[in-house]
Amino acid sequence: MRDDDGAAGRFHTDGPTRRRVLAGVTGLGLTTLVGAAQDPAVAATATAKVASGATAKPPPPTTELLAVSGPGQPRWLSVPMSRIVVNPYDFNQTSSEVEQNSGPELPLSVGYYAHNQAIRVPSLLSLYVRPAGEPDPKPPAVVFADDFDDLSPQWSAEPGVVATTANSRLTMTLPDSAPNPWGALSRTLTVDVDAYPVVTVDVTSVAGAWALKVNEGDAPVDTVVQGDTTATGTFSYDLRKVTGWSGTRTFSLRLFVVQKNAPLVVDRIAVQAEPTSWLEPAKDFTTTWRPQALEFSAHYASGGGVRGRDQFHDAASLTRVLAVSDVAGGGRKLTLAGRFSGEIALDGRGVLTVRGDAFGYSLTLGRETRVRYYADETDLRAGGPELDAPPPSGYWGVEVPARDLTVGIGFAYAGEGSARSAQRALDAARPDAADRDQARWTAYWNAELERVPRPRDFTLPGVPADGVGPDDVTATYYRAWHFLAANTLPEAPEVGYHHPQVATGKPSMWNYGAEGARPSASWDSLLGIQYLGYLRPDVAWSSFEGLMSLVDGDGKLGGESLPSRKAQTAWMLYSVTGDRARLAGIYADLRRYLLWAQENPRWIFGDHDIPDERDAEFVVSLIVDFGYAERIAAVVGETGDVAFWRTRKEQLTRDYGSWFFPADGPSPTLQYHYVEGSHADSPGNTLWVCTGLHLPQLSARQRDLLVARFRASFSPEATLAGFGFPDVKAPDVTYTTYGLLENGLTAEADAFVQANIRDIVRAGSFAEVYDDPPGGPVGTGVRPSMFGAVNLVDFVWLRNGCRADDGAPVFVRLSGEADGGVSGLTYQGRRFDVEVDGAAGFILLSGAAIAGSSRCRRLSAPVGVSVPLPEDCAR
């Protein structure tokens, strides 16, 4: 059917009326699906299922289900409300988590959030076997080195790059006048890369990011040695592995500074032979990821081995547990070592403490320990030269007996007190603590997983399996919830921010949000908050209230300006918890923000701010948010604003039609329109544009153009259903899916959902965006990211008959005979369970949130129709 305006009737979130329609499914050779006939026998079967409590609920998951070994495993670890991330991931690199955060030296790296900073400490702790006797260190031969006593004229700066030297350090900056937010300093070298394969760079500090590339001749694209990174310290790269080169090569070595007015300071850059290692790393090792610990084992060429794990003692401290076997023979010992930057000192209790501007950390190394200091990792591994005094940054090492040991690592942000980190380290190293902590965290995560809403169906029958089975989907679904729970950060009193945060991607160290809550992106974090409402509603509300408290008097929220999901988040939290007072408490901030967003429907970040730009992705999200604002106004008693938001929504919908559906132009559908002509209009990205299918008042022409654009790329047999970077991003994928359903394209929606579930699993990471290179799907952009996790949860729920986007119970069946359901959902603070009876065509409900009559607990649900819980059926 069609409404008077030509738009297909469908369920929408924009007001008190919900409309439903069953539309035919056409096109692309997909089978047309229809609802099951409601004959007496079918109805009787459904009634009997309700009476008997339906099918048995799936058993609760445990941490064992989530454990992963091998090259695709995660390597990060954190716990709720901790500032600490073990093994944070540098998403600017193409290497995997295993490649970045494991190795024969068994490294433990850390990320820490404090004072509006996200700080990395790579290789905070590592382990070697120390041979008997004393080392005879020989530095590697060097073919090229620059200590930057002055700036050699052989370096060439790209336009806009300002390069200076002082105190034997190079500083690179990009002023506002620079043509690009990146630029390189280059030098041509001729090197026998078989004899001198290693490039080393000593980065003292970086305010933005840096990168290192090489170019042999005039290649149009540089070869990336080090992608954009915010890390500091000494870095070494094997040119043979990065480039595939051998023999003598002439190439340009290119050091990049990234971001304007963000200086990069470098001490030294060199090309040298492979260093020799007197200290012995493992000849082979294995690692296993579990929610409660990172386990490892290693064997050494000289004999013996270690088993161990890295785990949290509490939110402010870690423990490394080592079980050593058959290493002590022949006078061998162990060397504990670590990289540091800052003031470093050993106290009389054998606690080594490192202090920086934002935080400090301490390690328990044992009484009567002698600490040796080295300029870099090469000197550490060679056994020297040792330094008489610790440098501002470098490496430390201590030798310890080759027997079982426990190392406690404590942390404290600047302002907590200088003794806090040391005491926390001592507490984490107590002999009786490690096993008890492991059992406690295992029990904690098992209990948390038991609280997670449990789907019944993890099958993907509508797309090629490509190696993904129901068990893989199940494990990834619960890993998504673990990620969501572990992704929270505590209050930050040191910067005056007294709310928890749901980070954009805690292990990614993304930190570009509003001051005070920089780890929280005002898009990614909001989607996480929506789902955290089912698991930890108070934390979800507090996190949302904190973000809204940062909306300024003009309505702007600082940091990266992103499409609005704020009204939707407020409505979902209210629907799940029933907390009207908290909804009313954020309304004034929400109102200011939405009005600001209407005047600025575009991406604003750094120096990207084009006032006349109109972005369809932003406009669609805001129109939908105006619909939620209309409902919120009615609930909180702002009755005059109900019509206000409706009028705003209608006007913006008219603007949407005039901006993005030109009669003539570069494309019949646009993502980018410039109202004053400052730039050329652009069709942009397909799925970002197709979010418009989710709008309630599309004209027939607009709807047909959007469907045609979707179908032009859609391929249900292909990876990610025919889409890739930068299209496949959670907010766009989900809004497009809802739009497909609301326009009667149920089979397309089902195939799209199943392909995305499968390929998130195949990619092996929760990412901001997914791509489809020939080797299979991969995560790109910020990762680990909240987007990938909530996308998977949303789509698994959809496959099980539950729409999450409204907060209030709304149900939809995607296919004819499929059963399913989700248990442990929440509405207005009360629990309820859902079962999908595919054969009968019913949604079967139970639980305290649902009224007891059969009319309320057995809802007819034709395929493709979004069915809301009747208003009088909620308790």
Image (spheres, helix red, strand yellow):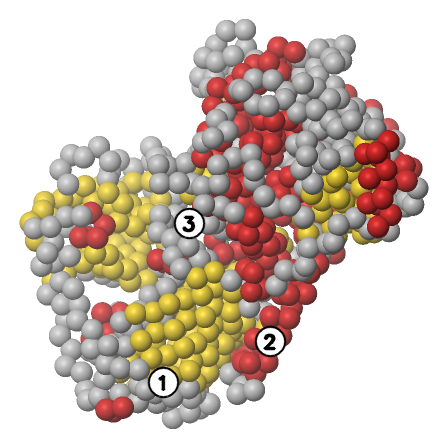
Amino acid type of the residue tagged 3 in the rendering:
Phe
Q: Is residue 316 above or below residue 839?
A: below
Dot 3 or dot 2, earlier in sequence:
3
Indicate the secondary structure of the residue bearing disc 2. Answer: helix
**Which is nearer the eye, 375 or 742?**
742
Residue 91 image label: 3
Indicate the secondary structure of the residue bearing disc 1. Answer: strand
Residue 325 image label: 1
Q: Position of residue 375 (x, y in %)?
A: 26, 71
Q: Residue at x 76, y 10 (%)?
A: 4
Residue 439 image label: 2
Instruction: Count neighbours of disc 1 (C-alpha within 10 A) and say few if under 14, some if 14 to 19, many if 20 or more.
Output: some
Q: Nearer the viewer, mark 3 or mark 2?
A: 2
Amino acid type of the residue tagged 1 in the rendering:
Ser
Q: Position of residue 663 (x, y in %)?
A: 54, 6
**Which is nearer the eye, 805 or 221?**
805
